[in-house]
Image (cartoon, grey):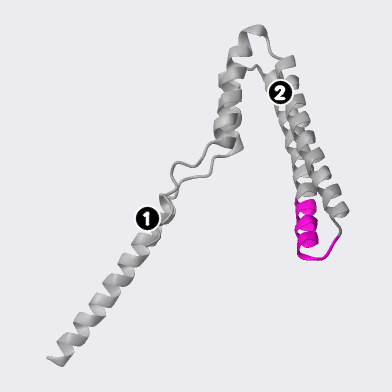
Amino acid sequence: MQINKLKIYQWATWCLLLLNLAMLCFFMLTKPKHPNNKNFNNAVKQEMNLNEEQVNLFLVSANKHIEQMAIISDRQQVLWQSYFKMLSSSGTLIKNDSIISELQNLETQKIAVTTTHFKEIKSFLMPAQYRGFSVFQQRLLERNFKKDKNMPPPPKDF
């Protein structure tokens, strides 16, 4: 009788281990993919009906835009860290005001860089492609500024 219980426990352990491994494999294989730039670039090409030369111009402009935005964002991160360090210390308000002013200037630069990017794209489009450009802009707005609808609501406090 004792040997049968031991065998049952061993089989149960192996079955549960296999079940766990199967669940891990399932979750890893069905994990949603992060949207990549290749699919985005293909969608842009189709929406605006771009030819190969226009696609190359678009990619050059987009890469330049990404690089410029990354530089500005890096600078903003450094300034935010400085700002919060100044808040926690007994720093002068004048220093904080200059940091705030610089942060505002960087936001203005972001807007200018993005405006220039959109003007560059529009400059190589034909008038028949402008409608696709509007769709492209709308998709960018949705992609960058929509709230994540898949997030669960915050927990309720009891």
Is 108 drawn above or below residue 6 in the view shown? above
Name the image quarter holding residue 55.
Answer: top right
**Which residue is painted at 24% across and 77% down in the image?**
11
Residue position for label 1: 26
The disc placed on residue 147 is: none
Name the image quarter holding residue 58.
Answer: top right
Q: Position of residue 32 (x, y in %)?
A: 45, 46
Quadrant assignment for the N terminus: bottom left
Is 6 drawn above or below residue 12 in the view shown? below
**Which residue is painted at 41% across and 57% down in the image?**
155
Q: Which residues are magenta?
A: 77-91
Q: Position of residue 109 (x, y in %)?
A: 80, 35
Is 107 drawn above or below residue 82 in the view shown? above
Residue position for label 2: 118
Q: Along the line of sight, which residue is nearer the eye, 56 or 130?
A: 130
> Which callout, 1 or 2, points to the residue nearer the camera?
2
